[in-house]
Image: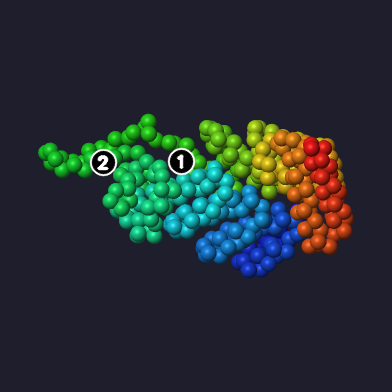
Amino acid sequence: MDERLLLVRKLLSEGDVAGARKEAERIDDPYWRSYALRWVAEALAGEPERALEVAQSIEEPSIQDETLRSLAYIFSKNEKFKEAIETARKIKNQFLRKKALRAVSNFLAKAIAMKGVELRLSDLRLDERDLEDLKPLPYGIVYKDGKLMPGSVLHRIKGEVAGGVLDRSEEGPKRGPPKPKFEIKDSRPEEYVVDYIEKLLEKGELEDAERLARGLPEPFRSYYLEEIGVRLLEAGDEVRAEEMFRELEVSDVLGALLARRHLDSPERVLKYLEKTHNPATRLMVAYEVTKKRGIDPDFLRNVLIWAADEWKRGRILKFLAFEMLREAKKTGNDELRKTARNLFELGKQLEWSSA
């Protein structure tokens, strides 16, 4: 880990966001640079345009998506719903994008219910397209005649929306308002649990978050266990992070992070990559190992296992070689230039062998 990460944290704690960004951009390793820029973007959440500009400069795709999800959550929590939706739309990972939009719709529902009034989309700086992204709306919120309105009873002590709808009919004899009716079959309690887990993660209360996550249905259970594993790894608890990794069937994020910590051991890297199914992530790890250790044909063949034939593997290796050559020229690293040339030759051999 680059020592500048600690300096970035220190500067952010002192309120020097500009200084923190400068230090973050000086970090050589693209992964840790991306992580430092995530902290900077989150620190700028009060200024959505600047926060988004930093977030979109993040190189690592998975960290950029996580940063955008985090910003969408913060924006919607601060009732900046237009900014939150536009941020969520930029997330490339489909699952994370849906999750971010669900958080936005939940905060929107809570804001409307707390106010207890009808709000036009224009009052929220939203339009019909925005609303489509937020559907299905949370239970208890109704959209009608260009307005969003509460259709549920609000428990104001906890700020939660209950699934009961009041009968507002004026027909019949005058009498006291009827008690709300609760439609249990339509409720989705896991959404409330997910919101609570998010809050626990924000506070760093990982043990409580883990207990709740284990009770969720898939894919939420695995998603949050992996997120907790990532947080444990960030906190330096690699043993617990490994335990979490072993429980997962698929682990694109945590598996890649653990692999990056053991680039000197290709056998161990392959163990982590067994659960990493994202080709781009596997490719990134292959690049890092090759850059550090040189050419290992067997290792590369195992990492590129999704490639159907030798021709395709050869094309992928040549692509990696060009990327490595670009980095070698940029840094003036002659050893890396040599590795890039050897990697290109290996890719060419594989292509020819399939002819």
* Three-letter residue code for mark 2: Leu
Q: How is the image coloured?
A: rainbow
In the rendered picture of this protein, how many numbered marks are placed on residues? 2
**Residue 77 visible, this orientation:** no
Q: Secondary structure at mark 1?
A: helix
Q: x and y percent of residue 248 in the render?
A: 65, 34
Q: Residue at x 44, y 36 (%)?
A: 189
Residue 217 percent coordinates (x, y): 52, 32
Q: Is residue 164 shown left or right of residue 169?
A: right
Give the quadrant of residue 253.
top right
Residue beneath disc 2? 166
Q: Whole-Å distance between the Cαs marked 2 and 1?
A: 22 Å
Residue at 41% x, 45% y is 135
Task: Indicate left or right for 238 with 192 as reference.
Answer: right
In the picture, the disc for residue 192 is 1
Q: Is residue 229 left or right of residue 91?
A: right
What's the residue type where badge 1 is placed?
Answer: Tyr
Q: Residue furthest top?
A: 185
The front one of 204 and 145 is: 145
Residue drawn at x 74%, y 35% as measured from the top left: 309
